[in-house]
Amino acid sequence: MLVGSMNFPGRSVLKEIHRIAEDGFDFIDLTLEPPAAWVPDGKEVGTLISDLGLEAVGHTAWYLPIASPYPEMRQLARDLYRRGLDVFADAGVTLVNVHPDQRVPLHSPDKVRAMNAEAIDGLAQDAAQRGITLMVENLDRGFSGVEDLGAIFEAVPEVEFHLDVAHANLRLGLREPNRSASLLEAFGTRLAHVHVSDNRGGGEDLHLPLGAGTIDWKTHIRLLKEHGYDGTVTLEVFSREREHLRTSRKLWLTWWSEY
């Protein structure tokens, strides 16, 4: 199991890579988005990652309108996504996530699922042409549960599953206490990457340090191990104080080894 951290897109990508290495992480969850992480020199980024002994996975902006009702908007989103894929390919990153587009108005759930499946199918083809595998991340509202995500995985069998445990803990009044168990039951064989951060189960993705919210982390570690997972885990903890991130890393490693 490898523990990683995401670069802050408001700061130089190269400086963030150094910061992540200094804090003892195994890999960078390389996010490509404005204002300062769009778009860097992929070869330069890849060389630094390698020189510092890190691995890397790819992360893309959650707000790209890949399934917009406007065909021009869909095409622009795909073009921007391809630009990111080019950087990832130059950097040697072979696993990249995509967020379904849940902001599609005036359509039935089946139509929204179909529009996203079509968009992600195209992006998966773009990724494959560059030697990259795409993985779909669960969200907090639409595409938060098995039914929505299952429609994508059925339509696009080559994509993998990216579990965000914090997203699975949001909007608890609407669904089961935490959706991680049902998502892993349905898609555990496709699990390629995991995001962890804490929250209080409401409607806001707080990205708190581990232990600062309501998520039962030892239960989630048990779930991951029961599904045979031993891959990359990103601490998506956002704080001005770096010690919160470092402490979360120590806690995760301790809990993982103790189970």
Image (spheres, rainbow, N blue to C red):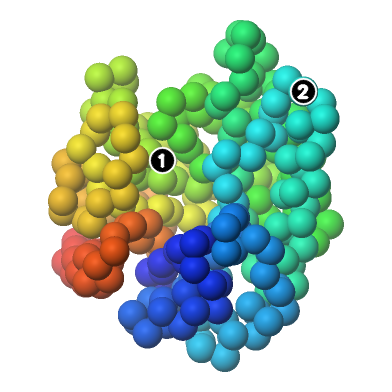
Task: Kindly identify the residue that appears in the image at 67 percent across and 70 percent down.
Answer: 40
Q: Which amino acid type is shown beneath numbered disc 1?
A: Leu
Image position, residue 69 (x, y; %): 73, 20
Q: Residue furthest bottom?
A: 51
Query: In the figure, residue 37 lies in which quadrant?
Result: bottom right
Q: Is residue 78 visible?
A: yes
Q: Quadrant of the N terminus?
A: bottom left
Query: In the figure, residue 25 lies in which quadrant?
Result: bottom left
- Tag in front: 1 or 2: 2
Q: CA distance from mark 1 to mark 2?
A: 34 Å
Depth order, front residue of 18/179: 18
Task: Kindly identify the residue that appears in the image at 64 percent across and 10 percent down.
Answer: 107
The kind of secondary structure element at disc 2 is loop
113 to 230, vertically: above or below: above
Q: Which amino acid type is shown beneath numbered disc 2?
A: Tyr
Image position, residue 49 (x, y; %): 57, 81
Indicate which disc, 1 or 2, sits on the residue closer to the N terminus: 2
Give the class, few, some or many, for how many residues have Cα within 10 Å of label 1's Cα (few <14, many ≥20). some
63 to 142, vertically: above or below: below
Q: Is residue 222 left or right of residue 59?
A: left
Label ID, residue 70:
2
Task: Kindly identify the residue that appears in the image at 67 percent across and 14 percent down.
Answer: 111
Q: Is residue 29 left or right of residue 42?
A: left
Q: Quadrant of the C terminus?
A: bottom left
The residue to which callout 1 is attached is 184
Q: Is residue 32 left or right of residue 124?
A: left
Depth order, front residue of 210/149: 210
